[in-house]
Every structure is written in structure tokens, then in C-alpha cells.
Amino acid sequence: MTGVIRHYNTEKGFGFISSKNDDSIFFHISNIKNRPMIPEIGMSAVFDIIDTPKGEQASNIVLQASSNKFLHIGDLRIKFSNIKEYGVERNSSYNSAPVLSLDKRIGEIEREIAEYKQKISDIRRYIEKEVFNIGRENKFDSSGGLLSSLICDIGEALQEINSKSPENKAARKNKRIVLEQEHNSTIAMYEQLIESRTRYAEQLRAEKNETTNDEKYRLSQNNQLECLYIKTFQNEEYVFWKHEVSFDIHAKLKEIDENI
């Protein structure tokens, strides 16, 4: 089976491969046959699928070196090895997709972006909590009355003083470095997803703003409207309408054919 590396955690040595039918298959670096080649997002791979107690997993993985060739469309660069679907369509959904449908798609993407931002926020709050608790590990129970409450207050005050000692300050600094290194790749992945989904939402908003344009409606009715569409393994989608761009979409289609 063939697929493309969709995600890889360099620190933990695992990731996911997207197969041609869009399934995400877990893999571990120990199952890569042509090591020391390192997996990269967008890199092609040939692999087998095995059943494990935790589910399906990729095995006997052979990584294929990335060509590092890009499709250039204006300021946009798309790696050829990262293109999952593409083609030219005539009189497709440019005008047939109702505005409400576009609103729904934009809303779904905005919810995805909010979820990714929340995940980043949760990770950063976790780091701050772990760093803050250094030197404050002991818990005091104030449920035993006035004396117990007084002891609790004294204990917490001593903890606060102890937490500001040079040793604990150094321990907090080291803990922060370790935790940030541990979670940086995950945060970076979510930030990349936020960036790509934001670009896609902006593209849909632009499409929504143009759906009622009379000239485009006339073109679609005459079957003159064509577009080049591209979808990547990260689910980024691009649409280039023939009458809006300065390049030949069929020439770009041929360029993709020759490099994939």
C-alpha cells in the first residue's frame, strides 16, 4: 500500500500515514525499513498494514525521498508530493453552491480553528500549572476547624516563601524548558492547522462574496466556467477559476501530471 506522511512527532518517534482512501494509519519509526531516513510531512511511503491489540498499524515502511519540487502559482507554493487530488472541472459548484452551504462550511472551519486554539491554550495552561506547583507540592486540609485553618494558612505562606527560593526558581526554569520542548511539536502542528484552515476559510469567504456576480452566472450558464482544483493531504483545498487567473489552468494541470 502507498500513502503520504501526514504527521510525525520527532521526539516520540510516531506519526500517521494517509492512505489513498484517506485513512490515517498509525506508524512508529521502529517499523521503517530504510532508516536512518527520517519521515517528513508530505513524504511518500510504501507500507503494509498489520493488526495489533491497539488497532491497525503500518509495518515494513519504506520511505521515498521527497522530490522537493513545488508547483508555483503566484506567491503560493505547493509541494507536488503533498497533492492528494487535483483536476479541471467545467461549470462546477462555483455558482451552484448556495450561500447558505458556504456559510455552513465556513462555520465548520471556524469551529475547527477554535478547537485547535483551545488545544494550544490547554497545553500552555498545563505547562504553567506544572511550573507553578514546584515548591508548593504539600496540600493543607483546613476542614478541621479554626486551628486547622490557621495551620493551613501558615503552611501556605511558608510554601509561598519556599517557592521563591533560588533552588525552586531554577527548578521551575528547567521544568518549563523540558515541558516546552516536549510539547512544542504538538503546538506547532496545531498552529500549522490553524494557518491552513484560516486560509481556506478566507478563500470560501471570497467565493461567497462572488456567488451572486451576474457575469460569472452568465459564464456558468454558457458552460464556459472552468476551474483547477487542488487538495492536499493536510486537507487544504485550492480553487483557481479560469476567468480570474492570468495563467493557463490546463498548463498547470499538465505540470502536475508530469510531476506526480
Image: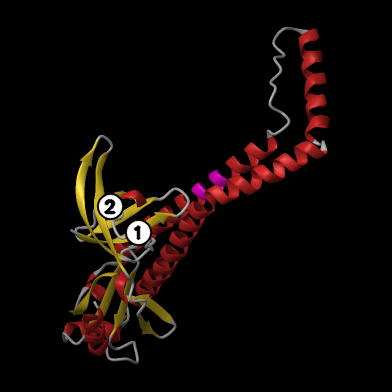
Residue at 31% in and 80% down: 240
What amino acid is at disc 2? Ser
Numbered circle sitting on residue 108: none
The one nearer the camera, 202 or 2, is 2
Provide the secondary structure element on which disc 2 rests.
strand
Q: Main secondary structure of the magenta part?
A: helix
Indicate the quadrant where residue 210 lies: bottom left
Per the model, the C-alpha gap separating discs 1 and 2 is: 22 Å
Indicate the quadrant where residue 246 lies: bottom left
User: How packed is label 1: few (under 14 Cα within 10 Å), some, or many (20 or more)?
Assistant: few
Q: Earlier in the sequence, mark 1 or mark 2?
A: 2
Magenta stretch in the rendered image: 118-123
Answer whether residue 120 is magenta in the image.
yes
Query: In front: mark 1 or mark 2?
Result: 1
Q: Is residue 72 found left or right of 116 in the rendered image? A: left
What amino acid is at disc 1? Arg
- Residue 160: % across, % down: 80, 30
Residue at 37% in and 69% down: 204
Residue 211 is at least partly visible in this image: no
